[in-house]
Amino acid sequence: MKIVAINGSPRAKKGMTDQVLGRFLKGAEEGGAEIETIYLAKLEINPCIACLHCWFRTPGVCRHDDDMPGLMKSLGSADLLVFACPVYVDGMTGQMKTMFDRFLSYAEPFFVFEGGRSYHPRLREDDVPVVVISTCGFPERENFQAISLHFRRIFENMHAALLAEFLFPASSLIASDPDIVEPNLCAVERAGREVAETGAVPPETVEVANLDYVGDPAAFDEKMNEVFHALRRHHGAE
């Protein structure tokens, strides 16, 4: 199995999203998968300007000369795609959304009515399997509602099969209190190994990975505010 992981965090390897992604990929490597990790923050991907050159003047070729063709080549070679992205303003990061917008260049303009709604024609004949990993600074799981729905709609458009979502609220705990989050991360690592070995993630593994570990969100907020005040004082802002 070849797994291509897309990290949409502006912080790339320094963020909590990469900590969770790394555990999944570690398990996948142990299960025999070949891994390629792409950090969008390190690529030049220009925003789509809706000129439609790629549809009518140069079909399949975008007017931007950047890193998108190489990215699409990697995505096309994958047996499994992993999209890892923190929650920014209740949605995905600008880097991740910009990448998805540029998928337009590789779609045909024509409409296909299938299963009660309209799509563009398929880019691949198979339904590529995908996994989502997301982190959020806020402690409540409801903060993932918008990004989860957005990913699911995009995957419908891609004709992709969502295998699992791994959602980590209060993501600072991954660094500040790792013992609390470790059972969840172990399950994520196990999921990577299982998907590499069997092509699927058992529901019980997904359930353990997404168990709540924030007992009192208000108390968590108070502790974080203490940290924020300390940081401001350190930098002379208070």
Image (cartoon, grey):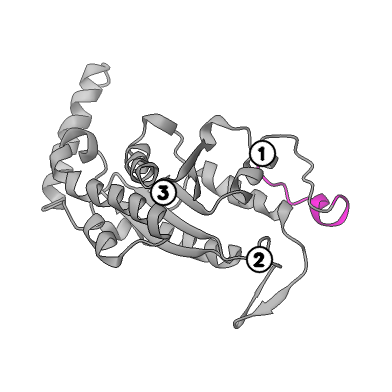
Q: Earlier in the sequence, mark 3 or mark 2?
A: 3
Between tags 2 and 1, which lies in front?
Answer: 2
Task: Give the side of residue 220 with respect to residue 205, left or right.
Answer: left
Kindly identify the residue that appears in the image at 40 percent across and 31 percent down: 13
Percent position (x, y) of residue 29?
Answer: 39, 42
Q: Which residue position is annotated with label 1?
A: 70
Q: Which residue position is annotated with label 2?
A: 125
Q: Earlier in the sequence, mark 2 or mark 1?
A: 1
Q: Which residue position is annotated with label 3?
A: 89
Q: Earlier in the sequence, mark 1 or mark 3?
A: 1
Classify the position of the C terminus by image quarter: top left
Most common SS among magenta residues: loop
The residue closer to the viewer here, 6 or 190, is 190
In reply to whether residue 50 is colored magenta, the answer given is yes
Task: Give the side of residue 44 with respect to residue 50, left or right.
Answer: left
Task: Give the side of residue 1 with respect to residue 115, left or right.
Answer: left
Percent position (x, y) of residue 57?
Answer: 88, 52
Query: Pointer 3: residues within 10 angstroms few (<14), some, or many (20+)?
Result: few
In reply to whether residue 26 is colored magenta, the answer given is no
Tell me the SS state at disc 1: helix
Between tags 1 and 3, which lies in front?
Answer: 1
- Label 1 to label 3, Cα distance in Å? 29 Å
Amino acid at pointer 1: Gly
